[in-house]
Image (cartoon, rainbow, N blue to C red):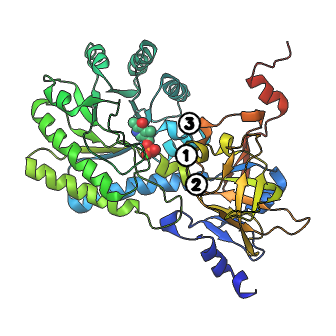
Amino acid sequence: MKKSNSKTNLKKRWKLGVSEWNTENFHIDKDGDFVVSENNHRYNLHDLIKKYGSPLEVVFPTIIRKRVRSLIELFNAYITIAGYKGKFSYHYPMKVNQNKEFVLPIVGAGANLEVGSYNELWLIKRLWESEKVNPKLRVLCNGPKAEQYIGLIAEMRKKGLDVIPIVEDEGELEQLSAYKWDIGIRVDLDVKADTRWDKKNDRFGLLESRILDLPKTKNFKILHYHIGSQINSGKSILTTAARAFKIYAELSRKHPHLDTIDMGGGLGIPYEKKKFYTAKPVIRQIIKLFKKLAEKEKVKEPNIIVEWGRYVAAPAQVTLYKVIAEKPIPHASAKAWYVIDGSFMNDLLDTWAIHQKWHVVPVNNAGAALTPVWLAGSSCDSDDKYTAGNYVLAPKIKAHDHQFLAFLDSGAYQDALASHHCLLSSPAKILAEDGQITIARKRETPDMVGKLFGWTNN
Ligand SMILES: *Cc1c(COP(=O)(O)O)cnc(C)c1O
């Protein structure tokens, strides 16, 4: 018993303290509580729940900054080592997490931005007008561009913001050729990638044959592609990049201004804490590959943009729940249902939408004996559950004891997609930074939730 309670063993048991899995800041203390370190500051998640209640999302801006900086540093380091002549810039895709508490530290750490809608660009306009951003900030605009969106791009360009629209289709190409702005064009690469979003008939961008056929376009600066999110192998990122480079090489002979490849998103997260590729070797190989191909094709080494958002945002947030009921399951791989005080369908809805697996770690009692469970959400929907395929291992709960569970890597996509099934409240959200706690989203009252559905008092 004593032995299994040692801190090292518990760290191993819960796969914490491993940088390849983005758990290097996570530990278990001697009482079996989940503790997060921020250099010399410590946050005990069990204490935070006691103070702020559950369900609770905890965001770590320090982790966000560190991930942006390390991406930029890695690219720049390998560019220097290889003597590569193109420049690197990182553009954070806002749709991954548009919350201010994410976007501000990301910009602060040196990121440029990528937006996908009029409303996202509108928020950047607000930021710009606050005069708190570097006038050199560059913003790429993806997504279908209705008139209003193009109008805002024009307005922001006039105000001096470096906004570059990325052309999605023929109509936009025609519309945007009326302006002298730099533009990017998105290509729908004819290549298979190792991700669940790899569709045979992608609806985004121009077909390879069509883009190669375009007449000389003076303001065509960026060749953009985005093959999907959460690409499951480093190799797949590289084969896609090689395909894009071939197109770039051909295009750059015709379009004099073209000098940049935007690789879009795709770098994956080791959600399941098992063998997975890491950023460093992939970045090294991208630079090596582009250098080699530029030499072979006798073209200029292109500037490189990546829009890896999930990679930056996911590990910076954890979502915490309380187990509020335990129900036996007679004939199954799991022994019991643990019902949590939040909802998978609402707060971690990729569980339900795309069968996302998360790493689950106890917030307290991490050294207790374990039992296989299925987890159920508090909505009255039978799809509101989490089984991780088979079962989840969680501490056995003693009578009158309370148990809290943490879901790691919840910082990407879950918030903007979140909903209010059964009118459950969203989790409260706190930021843990510099040893202090700030409330980013208060716990929703019934009145606040009701208002979202038109239940105002008059
Ligand atoms: C969604 C999206 C991204 C983000 O991709 P992730 O790998 O999930 O970070 C980047 N670029 C574009 C154009 C996107 O649509």
**Image quadrant of residue 395?**
bottom right
**Residue 409: mark:** 2
Amino acid type, residue under disc 1 in the picture: Ala
Quadrant placement of the C terminus: top right
Name above or below for residue 13 compared with residue 414: below
Secondary element under disc 3, as helix, strand or loop, is loop
Compared to 247, does 333 lie above or below? below
Residue located 78% across and 29% down the image:
449
Q: Residue at 27% of width from left, 59% of height from top?
A: 285
- Residue 433 horizontal side relative to residue 272, left or right: right
**Location of mark 3 (residue):** 98
Residue at the spot 38% in from the left edge and 21% down from the top edge: 157
Name the residue carrying label 1.
412
Q: Answer yes or no: disc 1 within 8 Å of ligand 1.
A: yes
* Residue count near mark 2 (Cα–Cα under 10 Å), binned few <14, some 14–19, many ≥20: many
> In the rendered image, which quarter contains the N terminus?
bottom right
Name the amino acid type tagged 3.
Gln
Discs 3/2, front:
2
